[in-house]
């Protein structure tokens, strides 16, 4: 049996007002996780942002997919993005669910993908199981952090199936991020859709066995999404499961986590980028381990430098920035707990944290020399999150200010490089990056500040 995968994530739309933050990242990480862990993948396609047009999505569900799948194979479909309810294609008084492609407009019926079309496409496949994951919502609401799209609500129609029931049938198993009348949200701390974060986490969890039934992942995902939505956001989000499979569908235990670091560089899955010619930049240093890390990072930056903001190379670059930031935060949390009020440990704590921060510093140095303004903006938006580390913390003031020291070092390094190269633009981008002062990511734009000037002293 072969596995096949189509992953779609749309953060950026032609209609910029509809943009999301992490949908493209959701799809890229789901796609990457399968690529790393499933040995025999047949058809595989990743469509993100401007690649995920109405025409491209329909083509991806078309003849090539049908010809690739043999009887008994398993097909995985993942979608992260906006959903909307609108008039049924065949009955204007009834409603239907639609996925909103990159080029979707408010003419939903003619520019979006009916969920019923997905079912028709799945029914043409010879696969023994179609597993569908949809991180979207169809509530008709479009509040901040929500994956809903402005449109009619279901009560305006005389008839409306749930999305799960629309896709249900023997051989189709559908897991959605929320009930139809709920909003599926993005989590600014996790940098993923809330549902996708726990889906990836559960797939990646060590289950102590070679294979596991795919249905086993639903209950822990559901419990964690409900708990996080309620406790963190005072929000109700309930994942749903519907469908019927013949027999038990298993997956091998995923032993390789989604991880983008200089040691494991996953560049674009787009054939156009893989075949493109890039300038070869090789640095030689005495420490061969560091030499490899540095040159892998330079290669990644060079590959994404001249691409559009939707390229998978840029998504890989963004991921390495946030992975490094997460490692820094994890170390800081541990040091904070371990040291308590022991003032004598502060110098050692700062030194340890600087060691963890070396990768973030390296990324900043590389992108300020070899990168584009887009990459510098991605990096800057990541590192200013260091200011969020101390939220909700109290205790030894000097220790709490350690993260500020790291940000000061980053500003200093990029400033020195920018001045040496007589190109102050990277430094300017960093210094002008908005910081959401002590109120988290939901702070209104008029309360933004930038990197404080005293860091330059």
Image: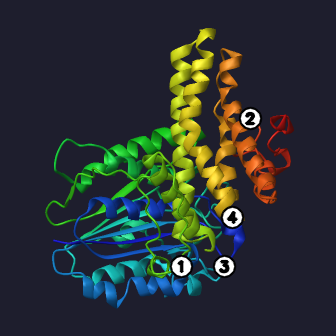
Q: What element carries label 1?
A: helix
Q: Mark 2 points at which residue?
A: 438
Q: Which of marks 3 and 1 is nearer the N terminus?
A: 1
In this rendering, which labeled residue sits more in front, label 4 or label 2? Answer: 4
In this rendering, which labeled residue sits more in front, label 4 or label 1? Answer: 4
Of the pair 123 and 94, the residue shown nearer to us: 123
Labels 3 and 4 touching (C-beta < 8 A): no
Q: Quadrant of residue 377?
A: bottom right
Q: Can residue 130 be seen in this view?
A: yes
Q: Name the residue under label 1.
A: 51
Q: Which of marks 2 and 1 is nearer the N terminus?
A: 1
Q: Mark 4 points at which residue?
A: 374
Give the x, y percent position of residue 160: 47, 71
Q: Earlier in the sequence, mark 2 or mark 3?
A: 3
Residue at (72%, 64%) from the top-left corner? Answer: 373
Q: What separation in Å lies between label 2 and label 1 (alpha carbons)?
A: 37 Å
Q: What separation in Å lies between label 2 and label 3 (alpha carbons)?
A: 37 Å
Outermost residue to the bottom:
63
Q: What's the mark number on residue 106?
A: 3
Q: What separation in Å lies between label 3 and label 4 (alpha carbons)?
A: 29 Å
């Amino acid at each position: 049996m072969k596995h096949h995968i189509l992953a779609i994530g749309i953060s950026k739309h032609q209609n910029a007002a509809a943009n999301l933050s992490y949908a493209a990242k959701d799809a890229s990480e789901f796609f990457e996780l399968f690529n790393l862990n499933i040995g025999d993948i047949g058809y595989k396609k990743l469509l993100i942002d401007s690649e995920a047009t109405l025409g491209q999505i329909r083509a991806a569900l078309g003849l090539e997919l049908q010809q690739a799948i043999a009887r008994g194979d398993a097909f995985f479909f993942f979608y992260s993005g906006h959903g909307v309810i609108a008039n049924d294609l065949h009955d204007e008084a009834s409603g239907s669910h639609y996925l909103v492609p990159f080029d979707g407009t408010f003419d939903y019926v003619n520019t979006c993908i009916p969920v019923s079309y997905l079912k028709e496409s799945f029914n043409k496949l010879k696969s023994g199981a179609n597993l569908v994951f949809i991180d979207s919502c169809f509530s008709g609401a479009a509040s901040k952090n929500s994956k809903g799209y402005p449109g009619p609500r279901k009560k305006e129609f005389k008839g409306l199936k749930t999305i799960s029931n629309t896709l249900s049938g023997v051989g189709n198993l559908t897991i959605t991020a929320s009930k139809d009348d709920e909003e599926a949200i993005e989590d600014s701390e996790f940098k993923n859709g809330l549902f996708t974060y726990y889906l990836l986490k559960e797939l990646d969890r060590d289950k102590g066995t070679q294979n596991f039934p795919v249905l086993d992942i639903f209950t822990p995902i559901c419990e964690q999404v409900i708990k996080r939505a309620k406790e963190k956001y005072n929000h109700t989000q309930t994942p749903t499961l519907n469908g019927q499979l013949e027999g038990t569908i298993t997956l091998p235990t995923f032993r390789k986590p989604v991880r983008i670091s200089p040691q494991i560089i996953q560049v674009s899955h787009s054939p156009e980028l893989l075949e493109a010619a890039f300038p070869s930049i090789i640095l030689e240093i005495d420490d061969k381990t560091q030499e490899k890390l540095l040159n892998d990072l330079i290669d990644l930056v060079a590959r994404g430098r001249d691409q559009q903001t939707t390229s998978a190379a840029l998504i890989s670059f963004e991921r390495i920035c946030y992975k490094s930031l997460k490692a820094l935060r994890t170390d800081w949390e541990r040091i904070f707990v371990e040291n308590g009020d022991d003032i004598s440990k502060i110098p050692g704590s700062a030194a340890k944290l600087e060691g963890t921060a070396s990768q973030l510093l390296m990324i900043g140095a590389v992108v300020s020399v070899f990168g584009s303004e887009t990459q510098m903006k991605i990096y800057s938006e990541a590192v200013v999150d260091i200011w969020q580390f101390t939220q909700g913390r109290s205790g030894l003031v000097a220790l709490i200010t350690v993260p500020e020291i790291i940000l000061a070092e980053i500003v200093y390094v990029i400033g020195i490089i920018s001045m040496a190269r007589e190109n102050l633009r990277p430094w300017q981008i960093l210094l002008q990056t908005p910081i959401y002062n002590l109120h988290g990511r939901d702070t209104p734009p008029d309360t933004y500040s930038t990197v404080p000037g005293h860091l330059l002293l």
